[in-house]
Amino acid sequence: MSESVGDAIAEEAVIELHKQFRLQWEQAQDCFVLLYPEGMIKLPGSSGEIMKRIDGKSRVSEIIADLEATFPGADLRQDVIDFLEAAHANGWIRQQDH
Amino acid sequence: MQTAGSDNKTTSKPHWVNAEITYQCPLHCVFCYNPVDYAKYGPELTTDEWLRVFREARELGAVQLGLSGGEPLQRKDVEVLVAETTKMGYYVNLITSGIGLTEKRIAAFKEGGLGQIQLSFQDSTREMNDFLSSTRTFDLKSKVAKLIKQYEYPMVLNVVLHRLNIDHIGQILEMAEAMGAEHVELANTQFYAWAFENRKHLMPSREQLERAERITNEFRDRVGNKMKVYFVVPDYYADRPKACMNGWGAVFLNVTADGMALPCHEARMLPLEFPNVRDHDVRWIWEESPGFNAYRGDDWMQEPCRTCPEKTKDFGGCRCQAFMLTGDATNADPVCDKAPAHHLITEQVALAQKPQPPASEVKQVILFRDDKNSRKLATRDSTTPIS
């Protein structure tokens, strides 16, 4: 069940936060943050916009479509994929088992 | 960067709040970092008082909460504290020996949103474990470890290493693997409080440390990514001091069972006045109180720290260690080999290379953390070790 770190993220994959992580809006930081045991990762700007759409139900393609609808005129596909692959390599997210 | 003593308010935030919700503990660990005179301190904060403190710290931007002790599970309100602080937006960490962690309680913690459980282990063998914590707890802890897995928490093991158990490192790691531990912290005893009293019995030799590191590295190579193993050497074996707490009053707020607010676990020993959360709100404590401002910035530093290029990296080390060993908290931490008092460290390290009595003999003379010993220690002159 554990995938090797650095796997490519497929657009049809459903992704979710890893169990230990919790995402929340943090007023004191003025951005979304990812909390985990004894630590916090700040997710300013687009990184927070991407992470908050990870709900354990949506496919990567749906997340991209939603972002492009919210921020029209930009081709975000590759940026989102790159970010998700980095997030995956960091262990923040996982692809759900099929 | 702001400096102490200036009119500028600190821009730092108490990112991490550690609540020592009780000094009560069923264990009697010889390396406990609670104050040796804990028995003399007044009544514990009530549930409502704790929740007020947590709310105030949260408003300042605190996100991580540690519930520790003593043994936090000695209190009946941990379920309430977990659920309420999770609602406030904290990531809640329970730091426990596991004693008192029943299935009913862990189910309630899960329901309340507890983020993680850190389980401490004294040693892998029952005999050694029971001696070092002075109770029969090993079987119980194994059961607790199973519960933690069952409730889908990551298995985080903290093992305190020292002269009397470090040679068991192989068995400790095998035990961690058998329990399915995902994170293992092998932390050598740092010499404060009870561990300081027992220093000569607990300080490992260089040979012991090197062997333990070698075995740990071999273990890491074998298990790969499935387990993260951290090995923390005693700072007496370093030549540069630790950046204690990432700086004084920079990110960490400790609140003791009786409500004293401290910039670290050990600061209660210092000859400073620290505020009590019963008398002041957390914002004043963090931003205004003399205790929290005492060693912010670098105005307080003496030579060699004052002109040292590394002062922004290690902040002169640990104030408590400087005070314990030299009697002046503004001195350089003697761990630093530039510190005039560095010989106080090297002398102890030299002593640790000599043969010491076996554990069976040490057991007769070592100081266990219990109420009786604590009351005895509370009445002595605080600057002289009793042994």
Image (cartoon, rainbow, N blue to C red):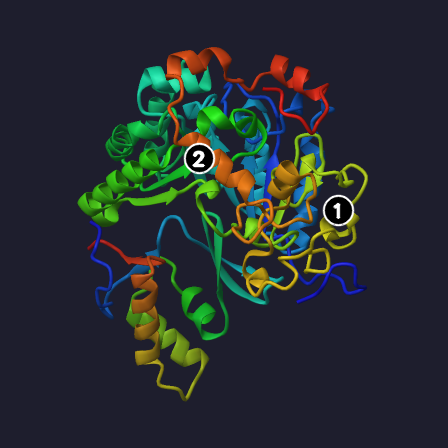
Quadrant position of residue B152: top left
Residue B179, percent across and down? 28, 31
Against A88, is A70 above or below? below
Q: Is residue B89 visible?
A: no
Q: Nearer the viewer, mark 1 or mark 2?
A: 2
Quadrant position of residue A60: bottom left
B85 or B29: nearer the viewer: B29
Q: Which mark is drawn over residue B291?
A: 1
Q: Chain of mark 2?
A: B
The crowd level at tag 1 (other Cα within 10 Å; few <14, some 14-19, many 20+) is many
Give me the C-alpha separation between circle 1 and circle 2: 35 Å
| Residue with the mark numbered 2 | B350
Tell how many labels: 2
Identified at 31% across, 60% down, the residue is A15
Q: Which mark is drawn over residue B160?
A: none
The amino acid type, in three-letter code, at marker 2 is Ala
B328 or A96: nearer the viewer: B328
Circle 2: element type: helix
Quadrant position of residue B210: top left
Against A97, is A54 above or below? below
Q: Chain of mark 1?
A: B
